[in-house]
Image (cartoon, helix red, strand yellow):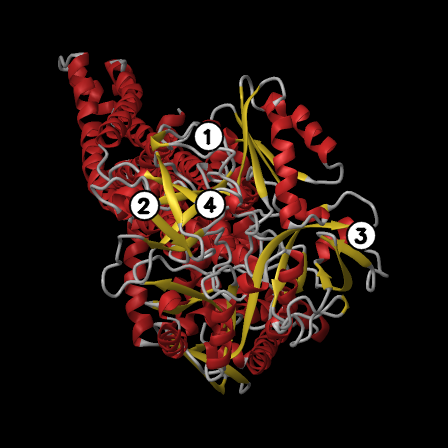
Amino acid sequence: MSLRRFFRRRQWDEERARELEAHLAHEIDDNRARGMTPQEAQRQAYLKLGNPTAIREEIWKMNSLVSVEDLGRDVRFTARQIARNPGFAVIAIVTLALGIGVNIAIFSIVNGLFFSSFHIQDQSRVIELGMRQAGTPWTPAFSDPEYQQIEAQTHSVFSSVMVGDLGLDGLSMGESKPARVFTQYVSGNYFEALGVHPLLGRLFAPLEGATPGDDPYMVLSYRYWKEHFAGDPNIVGRQVALDGHPVTIVGVAPRNFESLSSVLDVQGWLPLGMIVPIENEPLEQFNAEGNRSMFLYARLRPGITQHQADAALALVAKRMAASHPREEHGTEFHVFSLTAGRLSGGLDQNHAYENVSAIFLALAGLVLLLACVNVANLLLVRATVREREMVIRSALGAQRFRLIRQMLTESILLALLGGVGGIALGIAGTHAITSINLNTDLPIGFSFPFDWHVTAFAIAAAVLAGAFVGIVPAVRLARANLNLILREGGRGIAGHGHKFRDALVTIQISAALTLLVVAGLFIRSLNKSEHADLGFNPNHVLTMMVDPGEIGYGLTRSATFYQALLPRLRALPGVASATVAQSVPMSDIDAGNDTVTIDGYTPPPGQSAPIVSNNFIGTDYFRTLGIPILDGRAFTDADNDKGAYVAIVSQGFAEKYWPHQDPIGRTFTMGADPTHPMRVVGVAGNAVYGTLAGNGPAYFYAPYFQHVTLNSLLAIELRTRGSAAAMIPSVEQTIHNAAPLLPVFGVTTLHQELYSINGLLLYEMVAALAGAMGLLGLILAIVGVYGVLSYAVSLKTGEIGVRMALGAQRGDILRMVYRQGLWIVGIGLAVGLAASFGVGHLLRSLITVSATDPMTYVLVPALLATVALLACYVPARRATQTEPVEALRTQ
Amino acid sequence: MVHSKKEQEMLLGTLDMLILRTLITGPAHGHTIAHVIEHTSEDVLQIEQGSLYPALHRLEDRGWVSSYWGASENNRRARFYRLTPLGRRQLHAQTHRWQTMVEAIGRVLANAGRAAS
């Protein structure tokens, strides 16, 4: 049909009408000539022609772009076919649903990590800033002076620079026990620059928060307002207390806006300057150049690229290094795109996320390929069964194009049904991942919404899969020589495709091997990490967090509170030791790090003073955590504000900064307290803090009771004699007796903490996902091997019969079938091994075992080979049981 | 019309061939073609005259026939169809293919007959 006719079909139709009129006129002439009456002549003419309107309709339809009726007929026909052979359809649909479901689940995670919408205006123009100092990783943390400088000197590239600083505070109304809220202290321009408008009341004005302590206002998140204030429409103007400080609720943020990370659900916002009174942060500390805790975001001016922004920031860094050589030596700034799903830690992790995402998408793609190949093979086998039907329909005039379209309709229908199943599986999968317990009671969590990105992806995956599985048998049919098939009595279409089918199964084996090797590497890494020496003993340790600041205690009063509480906890039966600390391994709270000036150590030229992670701890800390003291002594009760300033360094610290020297008696100072040099009194074993990747072995400890002004949020840690979890009620009761209103949160055992998001949880998730895909790949590949060999055996029944009639032994037949199987499996394994080495190499930075881990590379191929050969055995055995006479008769 | 739909599709190839064969002797309009087919097939292939026109339309689409308005033998305006060189080649090819196919079907049906007995 030509397009010209499509557009001119009305005119064309009029011409047809005239043509038909002419035909009728001729027929009436003829009839009249035979002597009919005019009425009879006309009636007979119409009878003979048929309904002219129907004819015109048919021609009209031929001039239409898609023959809807034909499509409908194809779909109905396919539905009948499927209903006639439901087993086949169910297998095909389930296989495709698994393949598509895995892809949807993985894609929706990747989509959630990278492409989530924060419901802000023009999201792609908002960037996050990172900084580093000679050699350190990129971190998203800035100090207030750094923010001021950047804000003042980048007007040419940024239309606004925003601050966000996270906090945990106790929100109370009247005399009630405070509820913990996850707050963010933001610059006044934060909401305006992001284009976020209030749902109720107002948000902050640009100048609010500039002066410390001046603007006691709070904006609630939609969810917090709904859940804790029952969506009270008169909330604006309500007075509440935050850590004992009165603040006024001025507004509610819109429904979808929570933070610039899809993981953190901020519950309330306060102006930046409120950090000083609410968080008890002394002004000089708030203003210290090296006190870096703020996230900086900025909106790029129209037309400005990230590259240009970097250039402007480099200039700022240079000026700052000149004006503050101590704190800013070697400082660099860099802009990063917002990464929705980054949990915590350095901006360098963005690359790791990208790599993991790419690898998992590729693995999921492999699973889909395996599924498609299986279904394509099934369809090929069926094509053989149905080829006589095809040949006869073709002989009776059905166009080959129609037959192919019919087969494609069938494949795409199967794939769409598979896609629907896949979407269901995908949603279930993402839901399972979203609801994983992160072992934290902070309001953080994954959110992987099923948005239009995912929907589009799901449809695309289903259609692609349908086209793939349909195209193979369709092309074979198109190429098949129908006459030959009729003459050979039916082994035409698929019969010539032995090599092709074998190749498909070879691909399956190698893809399955790759999947299994990746799974193996991740599982081995998890296993290794679980048994790694962490440097502390996580068994029988109970940990919880309290912050007397939340009930309005000042920093000194908090310290007194702890001092009184600890002896009462130690007195509990079943408690072996108790302590307080500011950092807990793998937990959400972390004392962070500080710049240190070390006596007797000069940084290499071009580098600033080193930044070292630290912890502020109570007495008994090392005994409680089971960290060995290798040299010198642990802290004692005498190490308080009256005693000399002391510190304990890790073995890694001592080796790095005082190599081959006795560290005991040496001194160093930290940026937070530059006037009090600390004397090293002990060396502790290296322990893993932060994440499993660790902060590096250099670490130092200082007594909390000598630095009480730094923070009042502490973890209470207890070593118990029996089960740690069993002690929870009595410990909570003791704290309650000491301070009835004090909220206690994060009550968990250190062992559980190990499986939190900072610990093994991500490894576990990755290993579970990779393992599930590997298992799926294995099953699909085995079905493939089994299918192709069974089919080969059924085709060769005659040949086997002849051979056996001529005296071949069962062993010969077994060998014959196995030879084909061995070729397929062998080549598949070889190709798969090569591919696995490549993929393993890419995974190097993500796994803790070697990329060529011998255990994985020996066990996995051995497992796959064993299972594959078992799959060969069933058809091979069937072949040996062929009865020669029977086989020859069926020919 | 309803039950003849399927029949029509089956006969598509046949009807096309019959039309092409009719036109080999020279241009003709629809009414003539219908009558020639009716007579030469000795009423074995009883087609509704109307189904001729979609077939003609299809053939013209493929470029196997071309058409023009002219005056008929009774001096009425009618649309005439003429075989194109492409259509002529097609007729030869189809005739050949058809003969092979008929032989093949004969063999299949003979086999089926034997298996059934």
Residue A765 spot, x, y in % from top left: 45, 38
Picture quarter containing residue A689? top left
Q: Residues within 10 Å of mark 4 (few under 14, many from 20)?
A: many
Labels 1 and 2 in the same subunit: yes
Q: Nearer the viewer, mark 4 or mark 3?
A: 3
Disc on the earlier residue, 1 or 4: 4
Picture quarter containing residue B67? bottom left
Disc on the earlier residue, 4 or 3: 4
Q: Nearer the viewer, mark 1 or mark 4?
A: 1
Give the residue pinned by disc 1: A625
Outermost right residue: A234
Q: Label 2 sits on what residue type?
A: Arg
Give the residue pinned by disc 3: A229
Q: Label 4 sits on what residue type?
A: Ile
Question: Label 2: chain?
Answer: A
Disc on the earlier residue, 2 or 3: 3
* Residue A387 appears in the picture as rendered: no
